[in-house]
Image (cartoon, grey):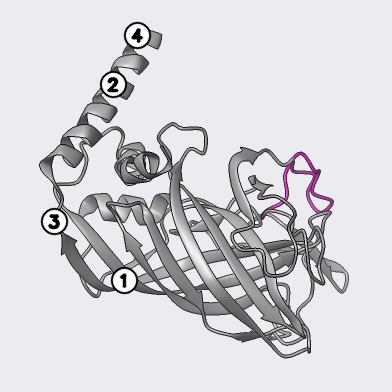
């Protein structure tokens, strides 16, 4: 059942961002380079200061610039990624290990643009710090629906990061941490733990998704960006990765049996029928 959901999740995501348009006419493996920001939120939503990040604006060490690559299979609805090691908290490099990405629709079996990410991090003598994260990839899937091409850049489109409205005080002035619409951003959804989560547990988060009900101390919003970490040096802190620019490095067509597309089209048709009946 999991494989069946993954194989139709991308078509559903594309339909969601294109208002119910038909599934794409081709399937691809997309490899890309990306850039964005990392933000560590404390359990109450306050952004942790990374002393290794630039002290000047616009984020005054509350966000850290990060880069990486990913490969995504639009048939399987899954992919892998990496993050370029980055300096964190004066204690050496944060080094990502085994990052997986899985399209999950709306997280409850319906169409949507969510992606479940699982990864590990080695940092300051802690190996395999488990991190799970739920991303909204509306900007990326919207571009996929339009037919991405090699060397294309995707930016300035998609959802707002959950931490976009986070506030912090610098001196006597209060600032926000805006990044604007971006192609793949962290949401407030939490994941369900896979058994007992300890160092080296990867994947650590799975479905069903759990709505975060914590009140953000900085702006009174409900829900903190990221899914609370369960093991390692930052228990219940929330790692946020927001991808603000995607550069398409290559698009490799995948031969897809006609039955797969027919199934995807039929699924979307059934969704449309159900919506009309509800209306």
Question: Helix, strand or loop at disc 4?
Answer: helix
Is the residue under label 4 in contact with that under label 1 (CB below 8 Å)? Answer: no
Q: Quadrant of residue 37?
A: bottom right
Q: Which mark is residue 277?
A: 4
Question: Helix, strand or loop at disc 1?
Answer: strand
Q: Which residue is mark 2?
A: 270
Q: Which residue is mark 3?
A: 255
The image shows residue 95 at horizontal and vertical percentages of 61, 82
Q: CA distance from mark 1 to mark 4?
A: 40 Å
Left or right of 124, for residue 262: left
Mark sitting earlier along the chain (4/2): 2
Which residues, given as a range, are shown in magenta?
213-226
Q: Is residue 219 magenta?
A: yes
Left or right of 44, for residue 243: left
Mark sitting earlier along the chain (3/4): 3
Mark sitting earlier along the chain (1/2): 1
Left or right of 141, for residue 55: right
Residue at (46%, 32%) from the top-left corner?
109
- Say few, some or many: other residues with alpha carbon within 10 Å of mark 1 (under 14 / 14 to 19 / 20 or more): many
- Say few, some or many: other residues with alpha carbon within 10 Å of mark 4 (under 14 / 14 to 19 / 20 or more): few
Left or right of 188, for residue 243: left
Q: Which residue is mark 1?
A: 31
Q: CA distance from mark 3 to mark 2?
A: 25 Å
Q: CA distance from mark 3 to mark 1?
A: 17 Å
Residue at (81%, 68%) from the top-left corner?
234
**Residue 89 in the image: above or below residue 9:** below
């Amino acid at each position: 059942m999991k494989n069946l959901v993954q194989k139709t999740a991308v078509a559903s995501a594309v339909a969601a961002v294109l208002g119910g348009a038909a599934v794409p006419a081709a399937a691809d493996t997309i490899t890309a380079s990306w850039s964005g920001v990392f933000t560590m939120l404390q359990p109450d939503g306050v952004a942790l200061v990374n002393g290794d990040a630039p002290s000047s604006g616009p984020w005054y060490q509350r966000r850290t610039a990060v880069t990486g690559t990913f490969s995504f299979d639009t048939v399987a609805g899954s992919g892998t990624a990496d993050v370029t090691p980055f300096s964190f908290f004066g204690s050496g490099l944060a080094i990502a290990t085994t990052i997986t990405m899985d399209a999950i629709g709306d997280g409850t079996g319906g169409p949507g643009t969510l992606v479940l990410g699982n990864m590990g991090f080695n940092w300051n003598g802690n190996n395999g710090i488990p991190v799970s994260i739920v991303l909204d990839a509306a900007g990326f899937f919207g571009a996929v629906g339009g037919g991405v091409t090699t060397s294309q850049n995707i930016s300035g489109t998609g959802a707002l990061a959950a931490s976009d409205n986070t506030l912090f005080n610098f001196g006597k002035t209060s600032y926000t941490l805006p990044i604007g619409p971006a192609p793949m951003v962290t949401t407030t959804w939490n994941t369900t733990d896979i058994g007992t989560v300890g160092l080296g547990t990867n994947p650590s988060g799975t479905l069903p998704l759990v709505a975060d009900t914590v009140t953000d101390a900085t702006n009174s919003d409900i829900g903190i960006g990221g899914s609370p970490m369960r093991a390692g040096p930052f228990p219940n802190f929330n790692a946020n990765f927001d991808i603000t620019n995607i550069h398409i490095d290559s698009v490799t067509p995948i031969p897809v049996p006609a039955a797969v597309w027919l199934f995807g089209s039929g699924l979307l048709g059934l969704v449309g029928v159900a919506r009309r009946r509800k209306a």
